[in-house]
Image (tube, rainbow, N blue to C red):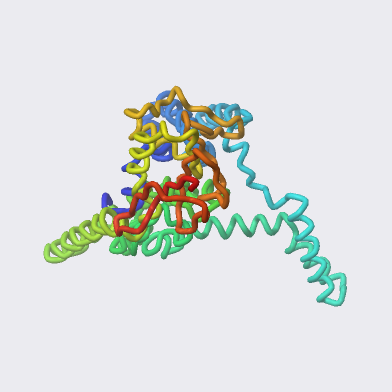
């Protein structure tokens, strides 16, 4: 299981979803041990780490038929969600009910009604299947089912979201398909329930399917694979055990190669290669410029690598908006909407990506990916 890209991708970094899932798992453990006070505390803490668990935990407790704990958790999560800064409250999961979309749905419904020669039956069918509520239900259903697609789990992961992808691999090892299916058949009913509801929070968001929002699904999936491997061992002879061990060893080597070697070259644009060099250059030359402009808000890299240059947390200025964003860090100005603007000004250093730059610019520094393609280009006005 440790060779699973799903495991490797998210346990090697400090993520709120990973911490929250650990709290959920320990909460389930102590719940089964009848330590309800500790389990309730852990469940509540998980809701503070990642908003998806404010929906997942109540569903898990519903499956456990633990109604007293469920009521406590719902009250606390309800209070958290009422906060105006809550990501769960701010997430617009009913965005297709907007007036613009409603108008589009109405036009689509009218077209279908007219195509049926304006018959009463045609209008009724059009309004029944082509209204904003029916469309949203279909969208949620399609998003939910995408999380159980075989290719997503075992071969491709998410081809449209490269950040959480390992080349030529799904979220789970390919060899694990048979053990997974065996474990799914032989596993406890609660684990099947856990696996099925794990995709509900992810289906209500964007970038579907998204492994980080579906991270809870790894727990039952991993147990299914272990149960399946155990079943194979019990049903086969020792010679088959040796084949299984060799298969596991081969899968481990392949997974680590794809993750630590191939991914660094094939998915290099998503691994921030070259940014340390950018931090070093800016730190050493910041006195030459009045301002440094960057796309997005990659302030964390300056705090991590640039403290020796004076990039410290006390110099952070946040933007007053929903969920907050870091607007600046000393001379560093973040949240630029363009990778590289079309016009540039004097005494400003621009951190750009790509290969299209303003004509009146001069390159002062470049960092590179592992394959020696340019990753970041720093420009000033001629």
Query: In the image shown, does 233 or 91 lie closer to the viewer?
Result: 91
Q: Position of residue 57 (x, y in %)?
A: 49, 38
Q: Position of residue 16 (x, y in %)?
A: 43, 36
Marker count (numbered):
0
Q: Quadrant of residue 236?
A: bottom left
Please report the residue visible at 42 percent of the width from the left and 47 percent of the height from the top. Answer: 378
Looking at the image, which residue sits at the far front? Answer: 382
Q: Position of residue 175 (x, y in %)?
A: 28, 63
Residue 234 vs 123, above or below: the answer is above
Residue 120 seen by the camera:
yes
Residue 59 vs 374, above or below: the answer is above
Does residue 47 appear left or right of residue 246 in this picture?
Answer: right
Please report the residue visible at 37 percent of the width from the left and 64 percent of the height from the top. Answer: 155
Residue 29 seen by the camera:
no
Does residue 322 appear left or right of residue 166 in this picture?
Answer: right
Query: In the image shown, does 331 or 95 lie closer to the viewer?
Result: 331
Q: Position of residue 31 (x, y in %)?
A: 40, 32
Please report the residue visible at 31 percent of the width from the left and 43 percent of the height from the top. Answer: 12
Does residue 122 appear left or right of residue 86 in this picture?
Answer: right
Q: Quadrant of residue 32?
A: top left
Please report the residue visible at 16 percent of the width from the left and 62 percent of the height from the top. Answer: 246
């Amino acid at each position: 299981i440790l060779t699973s890209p799903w495991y490797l991708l998210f346990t090697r970094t400090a993520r709120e979803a990973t911490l929250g899932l650990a709290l959920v798992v320990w909460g389930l453990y102590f719940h089964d041990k009848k330590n309800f006070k500790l389990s309730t505390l852990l469940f509540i803490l998980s809701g503070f780490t990642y908003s998806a668990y404010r929906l997942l935990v109540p569903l898990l407790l519903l499956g456990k038929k633990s109604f007293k704990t469920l009521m406590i958790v719902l009250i606390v999560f309800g209070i958290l969600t009422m906060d105006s800064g809550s990501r769960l409250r701010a997430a617009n999961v009913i965005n297709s009910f907007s007036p613009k979309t409603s108008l589009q749905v109405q036009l689509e419904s009218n077209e279908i009604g007219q195509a049926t020669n304006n018959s009463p039956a045609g209008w009724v069918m059009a309004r029944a299947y082509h209204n904003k509520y029916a469309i949203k239900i279909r969208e949620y259903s399609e998003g939910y089912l995408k999380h159980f697609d075989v290719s997503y789990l075992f071969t491709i992961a998410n081809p449209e979201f490269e950040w959480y992808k390992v080349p030529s691999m799904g979220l789970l090892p390919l060899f694990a398909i048979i053990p997974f299916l065996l474990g799914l058949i032989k596993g406890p009913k609660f684990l099947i329930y856990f696996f099925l509801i794990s995709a509900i929070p992810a289906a209500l968001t964007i970038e579907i399917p998204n492994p980080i929002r579906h991270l809870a699904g790894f727990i039952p999936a991993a147990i299914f694979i272990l149960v399946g491997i155990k079943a194979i061992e019990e049903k086969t002879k020792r010679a088959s055990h040796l084949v299984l061990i060799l298969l596991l060893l081969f899968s481990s080597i392949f997974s680590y190669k794809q993750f630590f070697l191939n991914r660094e070259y094939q998915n290099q644009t998503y691994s921030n290669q070259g940014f340390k060099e950018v931090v070093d250059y800016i730190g050493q030359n910041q006195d030459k410029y009045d301002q440094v402009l960057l796309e997005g808000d990659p302030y964390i890299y300056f705090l991590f690598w640039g403290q020796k240059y004076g990039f410290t947390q006390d110099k952070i200025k946040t933007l007053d908006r929903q969920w907050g964003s870091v607007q600046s860090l000393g001379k560093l100005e973040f949240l630029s909407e363009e990778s590289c603007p079309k016009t540039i000004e004097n005494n400003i250093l621009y951190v750009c990506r790509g290969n299209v730059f303003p004509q009146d610019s001069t390159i002062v520094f470049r960092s590179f990916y592992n394959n020696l393609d340019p990753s970041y280009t720093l420009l000033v006005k001629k």
